[in-house]
Image (cartoon, rainbow, N blue to C red):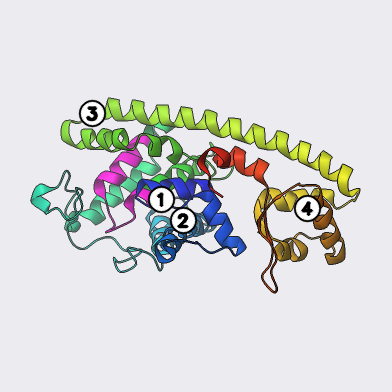
Amino acid sequence: MTQEAVLTSRIEGTQATMGAVLEFEAGIKPKDRVAERTADIQEVLNYRKAMHRAVELMDDLPLCQRVLKEAHSVLMEGVRGKSKSPGEYRKVPNWIGSYGCSIEEAKYVPISADKLPEAMGRWEQFIHADYQDRLVQLAILHAEFEALHPFLDGNGRLGRMFVPLYLCSINLLQRPMFYISAYLEARRDEYYERLLAVSRVGDWTGWCQFFLEALQSQAEENLRKAKAILVLYEQSLDRALELIRSQHAKKAMDFIFSRPIFSSSSFNNESGIPKATAIRILKVLRDNDFFMILEEQVGSKLAVLGYQALLIITEGMEERGAV
């Protein structure tokens, strides 16, 4: 989810990496352009919180406008766009184009604000319509949401968040864990052009083909990563058992695989292992180069460790230098 949050936000211009986000959560602050980097990281964290909020609401509600409005409110909390009516549909025109362009210079002008409530109502009805192909239905829903552009800010991220939420709502996924933004971020220009071509010339076939190719390609990549992570987990558990010879090896690996960058304190206190044993286990693993040391402990400042092998799989850390 963190990786999807990073990539969907990058489409909108942020520069945070997954490594930077995980470092931030572990207590390492950005070392350059601190305010800007922190703002980017906060947008990523908000995306993740917004997804969790949507999932929580969908325990009791169908996927609907209320779910998206509440997710949008969380998405915009305390970041760029926080003054642009979070959780509420726009009451004024907006448009898409180069930064600072006028509405006359815009590439695309969405539906007027007075027509939004009715249009969003029809869009919501289509979510629950009995359609012959659910993935084509999702392609249409995503394109229509972006065309309606119901909020003053955050429409792109929310529209992409809708993808796994929808797949979960129709039981194609058990949980909304499907990440499409890597494909879209790598083909950002084509993504936007395909969406615009629907509005300009009605090229639904071109858009649907592009979207379905994105789903297939990203599904294959997600599956490759998932399999690689499972193999790494088994190998890591075997090595940990050999090194620490403790019944707590599995708890240690479960913690590390849920949080591949972490402070020594969080491991000692939150891994579910008795503290004295956790301290011993961490020392043994460190002494055997199980981790890379991102920050050494200095005085009251805690050590921060990273499990490089997992980060390489999830983000390609070595190639991209994320940490």
Measuring 44% from the left and 50% from the top, which residue is drawn there?
63
Q: Secondary structure at mark 3?
A: loop
281 and 72: which is toward the camera = 281
Q: Earlier in the sequence, mark 3 or mark 1?
A: 1
Q: Which residues are magenta?
A: 139-158
Which residue is tagged 3?
203
Q: Which residue is mark 4?
A: 286
* For discs 3 and 1, the disc positioned in front in the rendered view: 1
Secondary element type, mark 1:
helix
Element on which disc 2 rests: helix
Where is residue 202 drawn, in percent x and y? 20, 31
Callout 4: helix, strand or loop?
helix
Location of mark 1 (residue) = 9
Near mark 2 (Cα within 10 A), the count class, few <14, some 14-19 or many ≥20, is many
Q: Looking at the image, do the residues carrying marks 2 and 3 touch, with CB atoms under 8 Å apart? A: no
- Mark 4 vs 3, N-terminal side: 3
**Was residue 232 drawn as part of the magenta stretch in this picture?**
no
Residue drawn at x 29%, y 51% as measured from the top left: 120
